[in-house]
Image: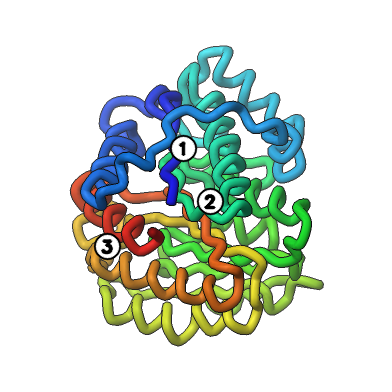
Amino acid sequence: MNIYTHPVFYKHDTGVGHPENSTRIDAALKGVDRAGLSGRIIRDTAAHPDTDRIIAKVHSADYHRELEEACRSGLRLFHSLDNPISSQSFAAARTAVATSLTAAAGMLGGERAFVVARPPGHHAERVEAMGFCFFNTIACVAEWLLEQPHMSRVLVFDFDVHHGNGTQALFEDREDVYYVSMHRYPFYPGTGAAGEIGIGAGRGYTKNIPMDAGLGDAAYMRATEDVVTRVIDAYRPSAILVSAGFDAHRRDPLGGMRVTEQCFGEMTRRIVEAAERNSAGRVLSLLEGGYDTEGLAASVAEHVNALA
C-alpha cells in the first residue's frame, strides 16, 4: 500500500475562504498517519512520461495549452466562478495526473494506492473546467490503463457527494469503462439521474445511484452491497478506480449527508473484496471532495486502512 502526494499540490491557490484549499492535503495526510501508514507516503515522484499525451487524449492539446496560458498570464478564474486559479494551478493539475499515472503503474505491479492530490478532477469535461476541477484525473488514469497489456475493462466507482458529470460524459458512449456513481440528487451539478445509463455502444455501462439529502450509513451500505458490488461481479473489470470524495461525511459543510467515517471504511472493504474476486485485487483510489478537515482526516484513515 502506497500513498502518493506532491509539494506542488499546496501551491494551487484558490483564495481566502475557498473550501477547496491546501489544508485538505494536510487533513488527508493526517488521516494516513492515524492509519499508521505515514511510512508509506511518497511525496515527490518523477514526472510520468505519458502525462501530456494522456491529457491531450482525454481533453485536447488546445485545452491543455489554454489552462497553462491562463495560469501563466495571471488570470484568477478559469471558465467560471467555480474555478479560481493561480500561477501554479496548471502545475498542480498536471502533477495530479502525473502522480496518479505513477500510482497506476505501481498498482499494475501489485501495489494498491491512494493519491492525495488537488485540484480534484471528476467534474472536468473534455474542454471545460467545472466544480474546482481542471483535468479529469481519474479519466486520464482509465485511458492509460486501457493502453496497457491485459487491461480490457476498467470500472470507476465514484462516491463523492456530487455526481462526476465529467467522468460520465467522457465515457458514456463506451463499454470499456463502466462508470458507477453514488451521489446526492438533485444537487450540483444537476446530472446523475437514474435514467442516465450511457449512450450508443456504452448503453448499460453507466450506473447512477441518486441519494436523497440527509441519508447516512444504512443507505450507503445498502447501495454498495446491493448495487455496486453486483455491478463489479457482473462486469469483472481488469481494475477498479475509486473517485474518493468524502463530502458525504456528516460534518461536511457542502454535502448535506450523514455518512460516518466508519461507513467509508466499510464501503471500501466491499470494493476491495470485489476487486479480489474479479480484478486480481487491483484498486487505485484518488482523492476528490471532502471539505471538513476533521471529517476528511477521519474518513481517509478508515479508507486507507480498508485499502491496506
3 or 2: mark nearer the eye: 2
Please state which amino acid type lies under the numbered disc 3: Gly
Q: Gap in Å between the C-alphas at discs 1 and 2? A: 10 Å
Residue 294, percent from left and from top: 19, 48
- Screen quadrant of the C terminus: bottom left
Q: Residue at x 30, y 41 (%)?
A: 38
Whether residue 253 is visible here, answered yes or no, is no
Q: Residue furthest top?
A: 73
Q: Which mark is residue 122?
A: 2
Q: Residue furthest bottom?
A: 226
Q: Residue at x 24, y 42 (%)?
A: 30
- 31 relative position to 229: left or right: left
Residue 51, percent from left and from top: 67, 34
Q: Which residue is under mark 3?
A: 256
Q: Which mark is residue 119?
A: 1
Please state which amino acid type lies under the numbered disc 1: Pro
The local secondary structure at tag 1 comes to loop
